[in-house]
Image (cartoon, grey):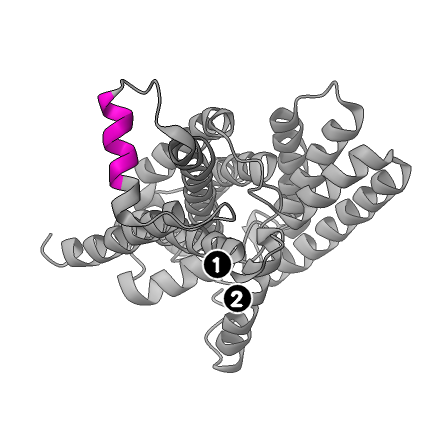
């Protein structure tokens, strides 16, 4: 117990700092800590009736954006953590396993037709992509890591091609929304996004937390799982479904945000260890803090705000290359 508290406390402190910074930084001008406290006090004193323009910026623009960014980052990191456990390889992530591409196609299809619900469509096609990847990689009940990565690349490429066809056939207004979705963005984050995002992410997070000891066993390998009475063929699909639900819900709200589900769980594993009792909550805190921090950087770095997916790739790409060069990532574990 004593060894777990400092790790979680450090990640929680980093998440809190990132969220505070996210509230203070924005294209409408920076609000200092003192101004934010004054706005909050005025808002409480008037019962939320009036807090002025600064209050509108803080509560209606920046706060929902920070909350959405934190939930999306936490969801992607936990999803990647679960996928890496069942695949036994830190190279597996929602975007590499084809889940993000399938969910992006589903969301784009809903945006172009206007009558499909975006989140339901994204989840449905995320499930289709995940099932296709899983079935292609499954060999006589065993999940080959190399086959999983290759199958994910193939399935992701197919959905990317379908997405390109959809973009070519869409009208300019729908095309603009689809392009922003594929690049990942938090530009239009609102409290309605929190409402639609929180239930599926919370359900998946609770399920993964309940299955934390199973993830520990599954990460050891199929033979070890069988030796303790755990059937991988029965439990891996459920873990996969929870990971897909989290990733698809995130894509439906924020678009495709690359590398968060790949790099964050791997980095946290080196700090918190491989025990999922510590790894899952630590990954959630680190993923949320990372995405909120990158979003704050995206708002402050340039006068024109670019999609956050560009920044996560620019920031995470060199980290991924460094890990590959050090030989710490992508090694087979089966």
Q: Which residue is mark 2?
A: 315
- Which residue corresponds to the image point at 62% horizontal and 35% vertical from the top-left? 127
Boundaries of the magenta span? 37-45
Residue, disc 1: 297
Q: Residue furthest left?
A: 2
Q: Is residue 305 left or right of residue 174?
A: left
Are discs 2 and 1 less than 8 Å apart at CB? yes
Q: Residue at x 34, y 18 (%)?
A: 49
- Extreme bottom residue here? 326
Which residue is painted at 46% across and 52% down in the image?
291
Front tag of 2 and 1: 1
Q: How many marks?
A: 2
One can see residue 102 in this view: yes
Q: Taking 277 as reference, is 193 above or below it?
A: above
> Relative to 92, is 105 on the left or the right?
right
**Mark 2 crowdedness (10 Å alpha carbons): few <14, some 14-19, many ≥20:** few
**Which is nearer the eye, 287 or 35?**
35
The secondary structure making up most of the magenta span is helix
Query: Nearest the camera: 116 or 232?
Result: 116
Query: Image point 46% across, 24% down: which residue?
Result: 195
Q: Is residue 132 visible?
A: no
Task: State the SS at label 2.
Answer: helix
Image position, residue 179 (x, y; %): 74, 45
- Give x and y (percent) for residue 89: 49, 62
Residue situated in front as seen by the camera: 158 or 229 = 158
Q: Is residue 304 magenta?
A: no
**Where is residue 80 shown, x and y percent of the image?**
48, 51
Q: Residues within 10 Å of mark 1 (few under 14, many from 20)?
A: some
Dot 1: element: helix
């Amino acid at each position: 117990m004593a060894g777990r508290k400092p790790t979680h406390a450090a990640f929680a402190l980093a998440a809190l700092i990132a969220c505070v910074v996210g509230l203070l930084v924005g294209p409408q001008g920076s609000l200092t800590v003192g101004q934010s406290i004054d706005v909050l006090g005025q808002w409480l004193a008037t019962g939320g009736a009036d807090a002025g323009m600064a209050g509108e910026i803080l509560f209606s623009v920046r706060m929902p954006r920070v909350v959405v960014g934190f939930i999306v980052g936490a969801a992607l990191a936990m999803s990647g953590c679960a996928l890496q456990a069942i695949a036994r390889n830190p190279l597996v992530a929602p975007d590499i396993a084809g889940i993000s591409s399938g969910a992006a196609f589903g969301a784009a299809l809903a945006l172009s037709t206007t009558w499909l619900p975006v989140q339901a469509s994204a989840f449905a096609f995320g499930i289709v992509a995940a099932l296709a990847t899983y079935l292609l990689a499954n060999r006589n009940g065993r999940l080959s890591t190399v086959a999983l990565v290759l199958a994910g690349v193939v399935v992701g490429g197919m959905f990317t091609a379908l997405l390109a066809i959809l973009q070519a056939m869409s009208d300019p207004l729908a095309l603009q929304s689809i392009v922003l979705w594929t690049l990942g963005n938090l530009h239009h984050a609102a409290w309605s996004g929190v409402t639609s995002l929180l239930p599926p992410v919370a359900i998946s997070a609770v399920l993964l937390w309940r299955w934390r000891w199973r993830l520990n066993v599954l990460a050891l390998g199929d033979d070890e799982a069988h030796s303790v009475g755990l059937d991988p063929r029965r439990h891996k699909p459920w873990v996969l479904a929870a990971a897909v639900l989290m990733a698809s819900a995130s894509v439906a709200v924020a678009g495709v945000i690359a590398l968060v589900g790949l790099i964050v769980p791997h980095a946290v594993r080196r700090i918190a260890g491989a025990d999922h009792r510590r790894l899952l909550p630590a990954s959630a805190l680190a993923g949320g803090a990372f995405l909120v921090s990158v979003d704050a950087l995206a708002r402050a770095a340039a006068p024109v705000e670019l999609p956050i997916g560009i920044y996560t790739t620019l920031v995470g790409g060199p980290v991924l290359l460094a890990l590959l060069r050090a030989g710490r990532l992508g090694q087979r574990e089966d």
